[in-house]
Image (spheres, rainbow, N blue to C red):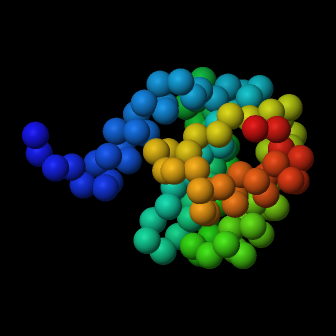
Amino acid sequence: MAIKSKNQRRIRRKAHIRKKVHGTSLKPRIFVFKSNRYFYAGIADDDKSIVIKSMMSDKNEKDILIMAKKFSALAKKYDSAVFDRSGYKYHGLVKAFVEELRKEGVKI
């Protein structure tokens, strides 16, 4: 069996998560992506196959918390949302982002 890279393992985990997580127009999907330099987040409606809004910030916790506050204003207009961690572990920047959304009143 070939040794898989870190990114290949994350993509495999992402596929398993996306089987279960589905966003609708009433309950959209909030997703995240981390590159080496930036942190991206977005709101998607999978029924219509569109991204409603996406944002980007530098990859430090202070900027991510500021982005989560701006992002929560848009997400609050929906009753609740589902969270897609995109194969990343639920710790560090991903956890800080989601906890800040919850603190701002977004139901995930």
Q: Answer with left or right where residue 75 lies relative to residue 85.
A: right
Q: Quadrant of the N terminus?
A: top left
Q: Answer with left or right where residue 62 lies relative to residue 21.
A: right
The answer to which of 68 and 91 lies nearer the viewer is 91
Q: Quadrant of residue 57?
A: bottom right
Residue 19 point in image, percent of width and height: 47, 25
The answer to which of 1 and 39 lies nearer the viewer is 1
Q: Pick out the residue farthest to the left.
A: 1
Is 37 rendered above or below residue 104? below
Residue 43 point in image, percent of width and height: 66, 44
The answer to which of 27 and 48 lies nearer the viewer is 27
Q: Quadrant of residue 106?
A: top right
Q: How many marks?
A: 0
Is 23 rendered above or below residue 71? above
Say whether residue 48 is visible. no
Residue 56 point in image, percent of width and height: 61, 65
The residue at the point 74 percent across, 29 percent down is 27
Residue 92 point in image, percent of width and height: 60, 62
The residue at the point 53 percent across, 70 percent down is 38
The residue at the point 59 percent across, 26 percent down is 22
Say whether residue 37 is visible. yes
Q: Quadrant of the C terminus?
A: top right
Q: Quadrant of residue 23?
A: top right
